[in-house]
Amino acid sequence: WAKALGLLADMALACVEQNAITYSAAVSACEKCGVWWQALHLLREMTESLVESNVFTYSAAISSCEKGGEWLRALELLQRMTVIRIDRGVLSFNAAISACEKMREWRHALQLLQDMVDASIQGTSVTYSAAVSACEKGHEW
């Protein structure tokens, strides 16, 4: 992840345009290494640099929060997507449900599942597996 951030900084120094694709790749690198705080920093940096974020950037940031056990931050990011008019898709919801599942927050996982139904977003086997696992981990048979 540090190399990815270094390359992003090098782009700025070389006056190469940083865009949603380059930032999404950097956020994804942070997600894969479990440095959720750095992923959130990159989201803030995008806003400050007037780089438009997208569903991929937010989904990776939500996944990084999931890996760090930051389920509330994951839910905040999912909510922010609505505020800034980024369509929440199945990837974003799956990441948020997984964050709830990891921390045994079965009620929130089921609420997200209901939110998907209300928004006419079709769940996948990943969606339902994470929701079922959240119930199992929360001893809600």
Image (spheres, rainbow, N blue to C red):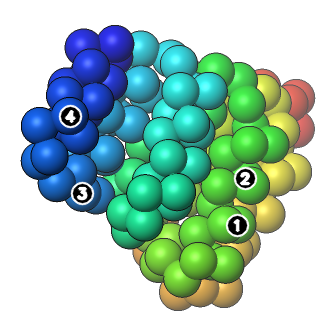
Res 123 visible:
yes
**Residue type highlighted by circle 3:** Asn
Residue type marked 1: Gln
> Considering the numbered disc 2 on the image, is that residue within a helix, a strand or a loop?
helix
Tag nearer the camera, 1 or 3: 3
What's the distance in space between the residues labelled 3 and 4, CA to CA?
A: 14 Å
Q: Which of marks 4 and 1 is in front?
A: 4
Whether pointer 3 and pointer 4 mark residues with C-beta atoms closer than 8 Å, the reply is no
Q: Position of residue 57 (x, y in %)?
A: 39, 52
Q: Which of marks 3 and 4 is nearer the N terminus?
A: 4
Residue positioned 73% across, 53% down in the render: 75
Mark in front: 4 vs 2: 4
Q: Of residues 19 and 129, which is closer to you in this image?
A: 19
For the residues labelled 1 and 2, say whether their Cβ atoms are less than 8 Å apart: yes
| Residue linked to disc 2 | 75
Q: Is mark 1 on a helix, strand or loop?
A: helix
Residue ID at (23%, 51%): 18
Residue depicted at 71% across the width and 24% down the height:
69
Name the image quarter holding residue 81.
bottom right
Q: Does the residue at mark 4 contact the one at mark 1 (Cβ under 8 Å)?
A: no
Q: At 88% across and 29% down in the image, what residue appears? A: 139
Q: Is residue 43 left or right of residue 55?
A: right
Residue under pointer 4: 13
Mark 4 or mark 1: name the one nearer the start of the chain: 4
Tell me the CA gap for discs 3 and 2. Answer: 25 Å
Given residues 112 and 16, the one toward you in this image is 16
- Say what amino acid the circle numbered 4 marks: Leu
Q: What element carries label 4?
A: helix
Residue occupied by mark 3: 19
> Which residue is disc 1 drawn over?
79
Q: Which amino acid does label 2 sit on?
A: Leu
